[in-house]
Image (spheres, rainbow, N blue to C red):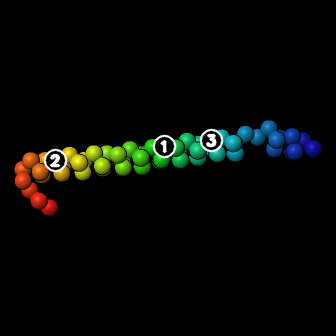
C-alpha cells in the first residue's frame, strides 16, 4: 500500500511532461519567427533588387 501512495505522490513524470510542453512551445515560436524573418528578408532583397534593376 505504501508503494501506491509513493507512486501517487511522485511528480517527476509531471515535471518531464511540463518540460516537454515548454520545449514544444519554444520550438513552435522558433519556427514561426524564422518563417516571418524569412518572409521579411525575401521582401527586403526583392525591394533592393528592384531598385538596382536586377532581375533574378
**For this view, does 21 lie left or right of residue 50?**
right
- Of all residues, the one furthest to the bottom in this rendering is 56
Give residue 39's position: percent from left, percent from top: 30, 49
> What residue would you read off at disc 2?
47
Q: Quadrant of residue 56?
A: bottom left
Please report whichever mark, 2 or 1, sits nearer to the chain's N-terminal start.
1
What's the distance in space between the residues labelled 1 and 3, CA to CA?
A: 12 Å
Q: Quadrant of residue 21?
A: top right
What's the distance in space between the residues labelled 2 and 1, CA to CA?
A: 31 Å
Q: Which residue is found at the position 58% from the left and 46% from the top? A: 20
Q: Quadrant of residue 8?
A: top right
- Placement of the N terminus among the 4 image quadrants: top right
How dense is the environment of label 2, judged by Cα within 10 Å: few (below 14), some, or many (20 and up)?
few
> What residue would you read off at disc 3?
18
Give residue 17's position: percent from left, percent from top: 64, 45
How dense is the environment of label 1, judged by Cα within 10 Å: few (below 14), some, or many (20 and up)?
few
Q: Nearer the viewer, mark 3 or mark 2?
A: 2
Q: Which residue is found at the position 86% from the left and 40% from the top? A: 5
What's the distance in space between the residues labelled 3 and 2, CA to CA?
A: 44 Å
Which is more toward the observer, 36 or 10? 36
Tag 2's secondary structure?
A: helix
Q: Which numbered circle lies on residue 26? A: 1
Tag 3's secondary structure?
A: helix
- Of all residues, the one furthest to the left in this rendering is 52
Amino acid at each position: 500500500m505504501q508503494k501506491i501512495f509513493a507512486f501517487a505522490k511522485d511528480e517527476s513524470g509531471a515535471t518531464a511532461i511540463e518540460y516537454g510542453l515548454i520545449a514544444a512551445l519554444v520550438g513552435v515560436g522558433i519556427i514561426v519567427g524564422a518563417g516571418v524573418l524569412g518572409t521579411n528578408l525575401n521582401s527586403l532583397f526583392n525591394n533592393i533588387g528592384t531598385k538596382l534593376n536586377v532581375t533574378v
